[in-house]
Amino acid sequence: MTSFPFDGIALGCDYNPEQWPRSVWPEDIALMQEAGVGFVTLGVFSWALLEPEPGRFDFGWFDEILGLLHEGGIAVDMATATAAPPPWLTAAHPEMLTVDEFGHTLWPGSRQSWCPSSPVFREHALRLVAEMARRYGEHPAVRLWHVSNELGCHNGRCWCDVSAAAFRAWLADRYGDVEKLNDTWGTAFWSQHYASFDEVLPPRITPAVPNPTHQLDFARFCSDELLDYHRAERDVLRDICPSVPVTTNFIISSHQSEQDYFSWAPDMDVIAQDHYLDHRLPHVHAEQAFTDDLTRGVAGGAPWLLMESATSAVNWQPVNIAKRPGELLLDSLRHVARGADAVAFFQWRASRAGGEKFHSALVPHAGRDSMKFREVVELGAALTAIGEVAGSHVVADVALLWDWNAWWACDLGSHPSAEVRYVDAVHRWHKAVTDAGATADVVSPSADLSGYKVVVVPTLYLVDDTLAPALAEVVARGGHVLVTYFSGIVDTCDHIRLGGYPGAFRELLGVRSEEFAPLAPGATVTLDDGGTADLWTELLTTAGAEVVASYTDGPLPGTPAVTRNGTAWYIATRLDEAATAALAERVLDEAGVTRTGSDGVEVVRRGKYVFVLNRSSTEAVVPVTGTELISGTAVAGSVSVAAGCAAVIRAAVIQEGT
């Protein structure tokens, strides 16, 4: 990856000047300067105005706004404008539209109205990219190229005939021989044996349960197909203007599963993500911390760019919750604490019209004279004050393993319980670790685990053959490994690992399970240590492991629920939140992980900087000595942070417990 394109901890935003008359543009630049905006993302949805007719380009207005931004000292993240094709293109070529698994064409009228496999779309898009690169690749304001926008959002998977042909080509390249595909997909089941790749279709709607490995490979194909599209745009940009770095904005969240971003990361000069608080989830700020930690994991520990977030409410949830006073600063600093070197928002001005007109912005409908804009100015000043944090790395003793392939496979149908969802255990254990005062890197199962005191493996249903030996090395050097239910069950082909569960991890954990006994929705079981659990039990026996807790009731009274084999722990059920927290604290303490903060008070170390984020209702006191950067005041021995506030300390001394 290249050096970071913006200075300090930059404040940025999407800017859509085409939504506003030219008379507003000078005011925009002045207000951006007042707010401390360091960069804008320009051109994301501008295709229809940049190329109003096939092959006829109108860059005059774009030249004008780019000049104004440059004169105002505002850098540009230049989008390639290919996210949403213009009506003339979709009208002329309806074959480029996406088709869902039911065979329904998804018509234009919103955005992302294009099939990732469409050669027609690619031809027109790359022509636009080349024109923009030739015109703006050497412009002094342009610091970064931004391929498309949120690739895979709304069009991550397409089941059309063009996609079917591309899928068959992908399979032929992956397997080489159709008999290898038959073996991998287990096509002896239900007379699914293929005589040729030409007989394979995408996993469209079928009369009964579809082939799960077929579904899994289609998910892999779709991720690879969009990555190939990104590479096509990137290669045009690098050929014409090689000195400008290139990225695209990932959607690393609980509702976007279509891309395997670990496989995408090597193709990015800078890792960028979009994140919006999802108030449909029970712990919205815990989910934010998780996605930030995962983004850092995708970036290999390097700083990353928050390309989009919201100053307040979004527009696409059933109830769109506004941020309370102070939350904008607190949420933004959480991103920085966990590795962001820039904090950007959708968008500069709240729109007057369109599907996102009620989405919050830096300049709300109320205008400059508003509490929200004053908070934006406050945020810009705070980010400027902590600019020296840029380039530093987060310190973490805990690794939590995450894998998009495991997510795709775990959430397929015909499993012991449809209530077992991949992200559930991941979020539960990440929250328990962070609430206990530790920091976790969320990393790939193939990551180097040698520097971690604790490795958490939540519901990693699909694993390859290399992970169990890697975890055994962690245990051999005295580190702790914590594995939860429904982990290690299948190989990378989604074939059951025979001999008993938990498959790949039986020897490491010193246990063997003969049968799963999932619980009905709402049912609970009691453990002999006083805890309760739900969702899952299994007929577990020990083979060298120590029993930590057993069931006292439910379908398997007396059966082990929690075990340990030296420092390898197995949790064979979904513990309640209190029991999960208690076990997390026990494992962290035994592993020697220094814990700071508490539920509602996050303390994160980023190099020599200590971030204290206080979401609790009371003052937080944290031991640290140094200088608080936002206020510029000295800190001797401890810092006091009021409820709902934050502090960033350049630590002269990192004290025990920090």
Image: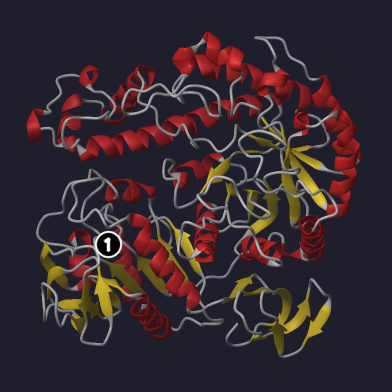
Question: Residue at (32%, 29%) from the top-left corner?
Answer: 101
Q: Helix or strand or loop: what does disc 1 sit on?
A: helix
Give the residue at mark 1: 468
Position of 560 with respect to 474 (left or right) is left
Q: Is residue 463 above or below residue 104?
A: below
- 65 or 440: nearer the viewer: 65
Q: Residue furthest bottom?
A: 637
Q: Position of residue 485 (x, y in %)?
A: 25, 65
Position of 31 with respect to 162 (left or right) is right
- 502 or 346: nearer the viewer: 346
Q: Position of residue 198 (x, y in %)?
A: 24, 17
Is there any visible trace of residue 301 in the rendered image?
Answer: yes
Q: Position of residue 167 (x, y in %)?
A: 33, 25
Position of 131 with respect to 320 (left or right) is right
Is there any visible trace of residue 450 in the rendered image?
Answer: no
Question: Residue at (49%, 41%) from the top-left corner?
Answer: 264
Q: Position of residue 103 (x, y in %)?
A: 33, 23
Question: Residue at (23%, 49%) from the top-left corner?
Answer: 491
User: In which image quadrant can residue 559 be found?
Assistant: bottom left
Question: Residue at (46%, 26%) from the top-left corner?
Answer: 116
Position of 340 with respect to 422 (left or right) is right
Q: How is the image coloured?
A: secondary structure
User: In which image quadrant can residue 62 be found?
Assistant: top right
- 424 or 588: nearer the viewer: 424
Indicate the quadrant containing the C terminus: top left, top right, bottom left or bottom right: bottom right
The amino acid marked with disc number 1 is Ala
